[in-house]
Amino acid sequence: MTVATVSLKQALEDLIATVQEDPKAGQLELESSTRWVERLVCEAQVRDFPTIRADEPELLGGTNTAPNPVELLLAAFGTCQEIMYAAYAAVMGVKLDAVEIKLKGNIDVRGLLGVDDTVPPGYSSISYETHLTSPEPEERLVEFQRVVEAHCPMLDMIKRPVDVHGSLVIERK
């Protein structure tokens, strides 16, 4: 039986049971590799999927051929929330017809351009509005939102400092 033939609820319940039995089964190491292509265009590779491109708008020196990385962060956050709504709806038995999330991020480019070192180079704020289409009572949906937001990995990573390590490898041609 493949994941495609198992209901979402059953697949998630099986995963929960597996991780409860063996916590190490829940430890994942996810990977991606990226490479600069030209000008400000880059490509990211994740598993065996087609590459994901990133660029900057013309205003920031790019060619506007793809979203920029901070826009991709908003997209990743929104889609992570939607996945969590779908997953928790299945597990909690919440009737959910549609989920749409509208996101906005505010950034002051003086930080990323090095014009003012007191200005952070990233977002100063992110706001989002979740639209749920559901016949469920409002109080159940409010609790549902609380559960989803308490367990969303992207929301957690945006709000909580994450330990990040980097290294430099110099190659010469």
Image: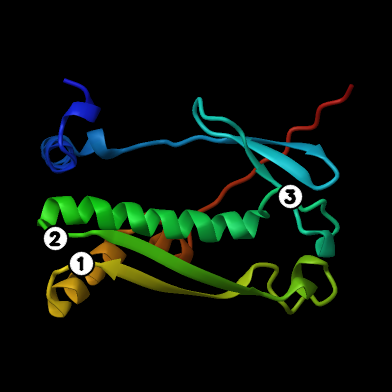
Residue 55 is tagged as: 3
Q: Amino acid at mark 1?
A: Ser
Q: Residue at x 14, y 79 (%)?
A: 139
Q: Amino acid at mark 2?
A: Val
Instruction: Report the mark closest to the observer, 2 or 3.
Output: 2
Q: Quadrant of the N terminus?
A: top left
Residue lying farthest right?
A: 173
Q: Residue at x 34, y 70 (%)?
A: 131
Query: Crowding at label 1, few (<14), some or many (≥20) Cα neighbours within 10 Å?
Result: some
Query: Crowding at label 3, few (<14), some or many (≥20) Cα neighbours within 10 Å?
Result: many
Q: Which residue is mark 2?
A: 94
Label 1 close to label 2 by CB (< 8 Å): yes
Label whose residue precedes the other's in the sequence (1 or 3): 3
**Residue 171 at what x, y percent from top left?**
81, 27
- Mark 2 to mark 3 CA distance (whole Å): 39 Å
Does any portion of residue 159 appear in the rendered image?
no
2 in relation to 39, above or below: above
Label whose residue precedes the other's in the sequence (2 or 3): 3
- Mark 1 to mark 2 CA distance (whole Å): 8 Å
Q: Which residue is mark 1?
A: 134
Secondary structure of the residue carrying numbered label 1: loop
Q: Quadrant of the C terminus?
A: top right
Instruction: Report the mark closest to the observer, 1 or 3.
Output: 1
- Mark 1 to mark 3 CA distance (whole Å): 37 Å
Q: 149 and 90: which one is in front? A: 90
Q: Amino acid at mark 3?
A: Asp
Q: Residue at x 18, y 56 (%)?
A: 89
**Residue 134 at what x, y percent from top left?**
20, 67
Secondary structure of the residue carrying numbered label 2: loop
**Residue 59 at what x, y percent from top left?**
83, 65
